[in-house]
Amino acid sequence: MAANTGTADENCFKFSSVVHGFHVYRNIWSPKLDEVLICQRDVNNSVDKHAVSVLKNGHTVGHVPREHAKIFNFYLKRGGSISCQITSKKTARGVGIEIPALYIFQGEKKDTEAPPFLLKESK
């Protein structure tokens, strides 16, 4: 379950959520506690035009949850950056396996003030 951590520094906003799709990438990635990964727009994704990939060493190892992807994608498109810190061991929920993570938005102050109001806790 995603939760708004409510922490916004001058040029940073942190958001607790998960990395989706571990079941697809488990042969190329083993999550490690506190590991930091990079988020990037997945412009070649034929299923979701707003998809955002989570990358390790330039290789996709998961995706941002679909319910948050449009906001993440827009933020990245505006020139901000988003990193993903693994916060716990894998947990199962619904279809596939999710990895708990903290997403860290960095960029212009005006842009890091917007995500707290746009990203809501998942139900």
Image: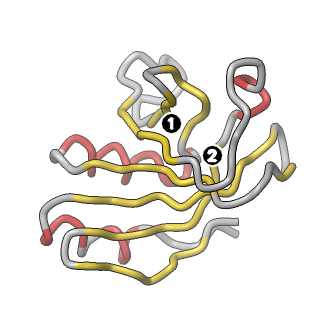
Q: CA distance from mark 1 to mark 2?
A: 7 Å
Tell me, what colour scheme is on the image?
Answer: secondary structure
Q: In the visual, does 81 lie left or right of 78?
A: right
- Per the image, label 2 sits on a secondary structure element best described as strand
Q: In the visual, does 77 lie left or right of 32?
A: left
Q: In the visual, does 4 lie left or right of 71?
A: right
Write down the quadrant of residue 97 in the picture.
Answer: top right
Front position in the image: 121 or 59: 59
Name the residue: 42% across, 39% down.
38
Name the residue: 69% across, 19% down.
28
Q: Position of residue 103 (x, y in %)?
A: 47, 58
Q: Position of residue 35 (x, y in %)?
A: 57, 47
Q: Quadrant location of the C terminus?
A: bottom right
Circle 1 residue: 54
Residue 31's place in the image compared with 48, above or below, is: below
Instruction: Answer whether labels 1 and 2 touch (C-beta < 8 Å).
Output: yes
Q: Position of residue 111 (x, y in %)?
A: 18, 65
As shown in the figure, which amino acid type bears the numbered disc 2?
Val
Front position in the image: 123 or 76: 76
Front position in the image: 8 or 123: 8
The disc at residue 16 is none
- Per the image, label 1 sits on a secondary structure element best described as strand
Circle 2 residue: 19
As shown in the figure, which amino acid type bears the numbered disc 1?
Val
Residue 7's place in the image compared with 13, above or below, is: below
Instruction: Determine the residue located farthest toward the bottom in the rendered image.
Output: 6
